Amino acid sequence: MATIIACYKWVLDEQDIKINPGSLDLDTSRAKSKISDYDRNAIEEAVLQEEKTGAEVASLTFGNSKAKQSLKDALSRGPAKAYWVNDELADKADALVTANVLAAALKKIGQYDVILCGEGASDTYAQQVGPRIATLLGIPAITFVSEMKIESDKVIATRKIGDCTEEVSVSFPVVVTLLPEINKPRIPSLKQVLGAAKKPTTEWSIADLGLTTEEVTAKNKVKSIKGFVMSRKNVIYKEGTPTDKVASLVASLTKEGVL
Amino acid sequence: MSHFLTEEQELMRGVAREFAQQEVAPIAKQLDATHEFPWAWVKRCAELGFMGVSIPEEYGGVGAGVITEAIVIEEIARESGSLALIIDAHTSLGCMPLLHVGTEEQKQKYLVPAAKGEKLMSFGLTEPGAGSDAGGTKTTAVLDGDEWVLNGSKCWITNIGVAETYIITAKTDPDKGNRGISAFIVENGTPGFNIGKPEEKMGLNNSLTGELFFNNCRMPKENLLGQLNKGFPVFLQGLDEGRIAISAMAVGMAQGALDRAVAYSKERVQFGRPICKNQAIAFYLAEMATKVELARTMLYRVARMRDEGLPYTYEAAMLKLYSSEICCEVCDKAVQIHGGIGYSRQLDIERFMRDAKLLTIGEGTSEVQKIVISGRLLA
């Protein structure tokens, strides 16, 4: 029976983020968090595979102390147990740091056949964590997966690359990163939400994983994050024939350096 | 915004919100026009546990308390008042009397399938000459051997036709006024029990409401619910429960109208800028949001009082009065902010205004709430 670990990121819900109209600073003070959208596909796929093959499913996340809230959310969606690496450094983590932490956690878990990740996170969408985990663990990664099935000790997956698809078969253990089209995450029932509290959770610190501070400190720093507001000039070319209007438009665009 | 809810309550709100956004919102407007009962939605609500949120697990429910039930109804009402009302009438009116005074056998037979959402419940108190004045009940029940014989009629009953089990009030001692009323469990299909056609209403079109007729309707002796002649307190308790649920609808529908008004006021450009930049509109929105938030705060407080087993009749009446009145105000202002298109059926906002009006009427009118409140205040 395969062991599937579904990785997820606990991100701010973009719907709750407000942009200060003057400074363009982001106001996240009232933003709630959620499981990153595509990672919900990863959890759903793990549970679908469990239903088809009887695989064992656990969830894994790296987050700050607030990510504790995510455990019941993840467990309500079907996994039998949840792992959480708790460190405030998660706030400043880049894809390399996150992959270092998740790979170390996977080594500590010991037993894994299929590691599922969303193709990218809802906030940064770097698309790096999955392949980096595979590199760190020295195992294959299958990316851009739109369909998958588990057969005995291998994953058979359809990859969507550009304008064609590729079917691959890879033996365990393997990292699979999923496109959102692979499934439609189900809404958990209220009983599943209440049942989540009864499922086992494991919390580790960075030290528990034997990682050094250097390995979990991002080498790049975010200096600022600003909202993007497209300002419009609201110019309307009203005068003259259509030919004149087009000529005026082209002249303006050329002047702006657009053409 | 924090309402000091538990992690589970917030997660369950998320479940209801997700269902409402993904499965209710896309077809709510279209379904409203059909006036059809939304069986597909009700089936999904059953799967998700929404039909027995506050019923204990041992009786097939979720056991998550009235506060969670209020949250679920609120979130659904943000998209469909009709569906919220179906759940409200089923749970707080239909199931609760069974839970409170049903025998173990009655609970197993009727409450368990209801809480699982396999069978719908309905509650019949109102008559042409009786409503909040339960003492005016004309429907009678007479024991004839081992059977009760019901005669009379009920009106404005929610979930008619689609419900399989009806909790019905009838006079068992006509000389004793309120002290001569009992409650009965009547199953759909019982000989002598007939269901009228659904009323044509102003709104809440997917919720079926209408008359019930009892013509020598005979049912087994064990269908008496609670003690003989003690039906009145059961219904008063039921009305208190129902007032929380209908207030949850009011908060949800007002929030739904507010959300739509905020979005539209940012999109609609007049005189070169979005209309929300006009103080007149911005202040409307500020007042609407304040009222919705106040009603919500009171809703959770009263639901919590109920869950803690405290007396809450007085507060439930205040909550119902305030939340239903502000819901109508907020929906009215939301239509105003939308202008011409708000009055048309192109958008959804007129549905909210039509649906909202029931809330100041059902479960006791605003005026009846004031009788309850002033009665306690002046006692």
Image: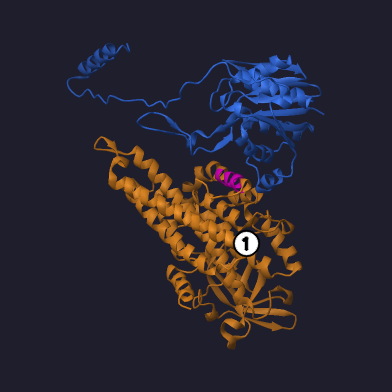
Chain colours: A blue, B orange
B139 versus B271 height, above or below: below
Q: Count the marks: how many?
A: 1
Q: Position of residue B213 (x, y in %)?
A: 58, 73
Q: Could you say which is closer to the camera, residue B232 or residue B143?
A: B232
For image coordinates 63% across by 82% down, the residue present is B172
Farthest left residue?
A: A240
Residue holding disc 1: B308
Q: Which chain carries label 1?
A: B
Span shown in magenta: B9-17
In the image, taking residue B246 as reference, residue B150 lies left or right, namely right
In the image, taking residue B151 as reference, residue A15 lies left or right, namely left
Is residue A145 among the parts visible in the rendering?
A: no
Q: Could you say which is closer to the camera, residue A227 or residue B123?
A: A227
Please, what is the dominant secondary structure of the magenta stretch? helix
In the image, taking residue A107 as reference, residue B281 lies left or right, namely left
Image quadrant assignment for residue A208: top right
Tell whether position B70 is magenta. Answer: no
